[in-house]
Amino acid sequence: MKIDLQGIADRNPWEAKGYRLPQYDIVQMKKATQENPLWVHFGAGNLFRAFHAAIAQRMLNDGRLDRGIIVAEGFDYEIIDRVYATHDNLGIAVTLKADGTVDKEVIGSVAEALPLDSGNPAAYTRLKEIFTKDSLQMITFTITEKGYCLTDAKGEYLPEVMADFANGPEKPASYMGKVAALLHARFCAGEKPAAMVSTDNCAHNGDRLHAAVLAFAKAWAENKKADAGFPEYIDSGKVTFPWSMIDKITPRPDDAVRDILEKDGVEECGAAVTSRNTYAAPFVNAEETGYLVIEDSFPNGRPRLEDGGVLFTERETVDKVEKMKVCTCLNPLHTCLAVFGCLLGYRKIADEMKDEALVRLVERVGYQEGLPVVVNPEILDPKAFLDTVLKVRLPNPFLPDTPQRIATDTSQKLPIRFGETIRAYGADEGLKVEDLQVIPLVYAGWLRYLMAVDDKGAPFALSPDPMLETLCPQMQKIRLGDRDVEAVLKPVMENAQIFGVNLYEAGLAEKVCGYFQELIAGTGAVQRTLDGLE
């Protein structure tokens, strides 16, 4: 059972093992897509393959779509050769359900897979050709929040961005430079309309994409490398940058899932690690739950993606859904489990949800301290969303997600995931910031995490975070059992950039410091503090 077109030509062995196969003519779909491309996606990783490609597959199966997706990878070109080309652009989506069952589907909705590489003439020329087609309606993205950044930590333009600004759209090197150059080709072909849809997990993602593209357009126009009308085209409404909210957990390919496939007889399905440290496999594993909410702003029309499960609405509602998820009903709970999971030595999120103390913690963060300040977006019910998170998604024992992965870049997440709630309490006459009990505990837990010593007193490796070089030397001044720690904590707790508020001005510093004192009382103190939560 090989994962390629020849391998699935005989459907019987696949279907006998419970695999669902494409119900459409893949060859005809590819031909139609090549002639009249409809949908381009940047970012060929796991989230795309588990979510976007699966949406297209459902619609192709139902006859509600006749063309597939053209995917382009701009960060790790090896994915195209090692995952897509080797398997005729097919992949297996493995859905890990909370009841222990596994859904296996061969996804065939990717019509073309190309490197977004200006140094690859054939691939780059093909992408330019695609971008000049009248039929192109939407360009979606899953390139991570970092993919839209043009500047470094000091706010200065990155060297490759500066070079692209100066050199123009002919052969850019930066990710956003290449995207802007493709839009420039569409502009030169007659200012054709299109929707540029970021589906990355960051607030106001469409604005980030718009700002990055417009920066290139303005630089090129000023440098006489592009027509003066190019920036106007980006801002004219012919090109739109809708906001979206996406939510689906897609951990890196798991060995246990590979074992399931190999036992079924699937060949050559192991993961490879690329030179850029990407874990790439011909399968993806993901949870069953998934949400995609998009602002309905498509100047060249769009496929009826609502038939595939996408929710379309206006910008204000997308913003409410995003805040519901990121500030109260999911992301803060993830951070709670990430911080304390690392301290307590857990390796799976689901295992943490067997710890009654951690369950009480996240339930209080969500139900007691989060829900009171949620603005109901109506399109999704916050209480029902939170119920699914706590009762289905986080406890799913078959989803191989780790606190160590989620702990990455926590310093960048705290201001949104908790700071927004604190500010909402301060702005609401019916609520009091001083009533918050568990959010200060999570802040204290993160400070305890920065000591890089677990609850047994053993050192552990911190997850990557841009603030570690600044914060760790400060936190290493503290040892388990120390009694007077506020002088060390004060410069950190005053940093509103980290916590979303100055903890002293918000009236929470004393509470955070007190919790921290409990957490460092000695070995086992973290678990004892959590067990003591009422």
Image (cartoon, rainbow, N blue to C red):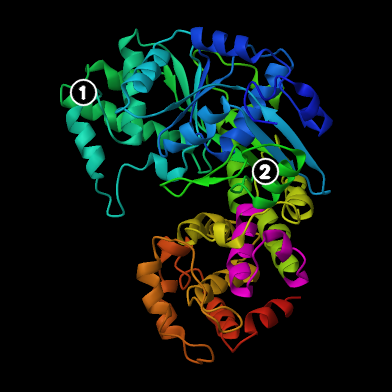
Element marked by disc 1: helix
- Disc 1 target residue: 221
Residue 310 visible here: no
Is residue 134 visible to us here?
yes
Image coordinates for residue 262, horizontal then vertical, percent: 71, 43
Say whether residue 327 is left or right of residue 461.
right
**Residue 47: percent from the left, percent from the top?**
58, 39
Secondary structure at numbered mark 2: strand
Q: Start and end of the magenta stretch?
A: 328-357
* Camera-side residue of 460 and 325: 460
| Amino acid type, label 1 | Ala
Identify which residue, 479 or 18, lies in the foreground: 18
Q: Nearer the viewer, residue 493 or 531?
A: 531
Q: Compared to 35, does 173 lie above or below?
A: below
Q: Could you say where residue 436 lies in the image, as x and y percent from the top left?
A: 63, 68
Side (left or right) of 430 relative to 138: right
Which residue is painted at 31% across and 54% down in the image? Answer: 153
| Dot 2 amino acid type | Ala
Is 206 one of the magenta-colored residues? Answer: no
